[in-house]
Image (cartoon, helix red, strand yellow):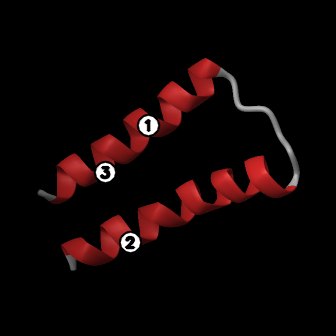
Amino acid sequence: MSIAVVISSGFGLVTVLLARMVLKEKISKIQTLGISLTFIGVIGLTI
C-alpha cells in the first residue's frame, strides 16, 4: 500500500517534467522548491 502512494505521487513529477520539456514552460525557483518539498514529504510519510 505504501508503495502505491509513492508511485501515484510520481505522476505529478512526470507531468511537470513533460510540461517543461514538451511545452517549454518555465518553472521558477520557488516552484521547483515547492515541488521538491512536496515529493520529499510524500516519501517521508511512506517510510
User: Is disc 1 placed on a helix, strand or loop?
Assistant: helix
Tell me which label, 1 or 3, sits earlier in the chain: 1
Number of residue marks: 3
Residue with the most extreme left position? 47
Residue 1 at what x, y percent from top left? 21, 80
Q: In the displayed structure, would residue 24 be above or below residue 5? A: above
Q: Mark 1 or mark 3: which is in front?
A: 1
Query: As drawn, is 16 to the left or to the right of 42?
Result: right
Residue with the most extreme right position? 23
Residue 31 at what x, y percent from top left? 61, 28
**Disc 3 target residue:** 42
Tell me which label, 1 or 2, sits earlier in the chain: 2
**Disc 1 target residue:** 36
Instruction: Indicate the quadrant where residue 18 lies.
Output: bottom right
Are the residues flagged by discs 1 and 2 in contact, CB closer than 8 Å? no
Which amino acid, by three-letter code, is at mark 1? Ser
Image point (41%, 40%), residue name: 38
User: Is disc 3 placed on a helix, strand or loop?
Assistant: helix
Count residues near mark 2 (Cα–Cα under 10 Å), then give few for <14, some for 14-19, many for 20+: few
Instruction: Indicate the quadrant where residue 32 lies.
Output: top right
Which amino acid, by three-letter code, is at mark 3? Val
Alpha-carbon distance for marks 1 and 3? 10 Å
User: Is disc 2 placed on a helix, strand or loop?
Assistant: helix
Which amino acid, by three-letter code, is at mark 2? Ile
Residue 11 at what x, y percent from top left? 54, 66
Image point (68%, 23%), residue name: 28
Q: In the displayed structure, would residue 5 be above or below residue 28? A: below
Alpha-carbon distance for marks 2 and 3? 10 Å
**Disc 2 target residue:** 7
Locate the C terminus by quadrant.
bottom left
Count residues near mark 1 (Cα–Cα under 10 Å), then give few for <14, some for 14-19, many for 20+: few
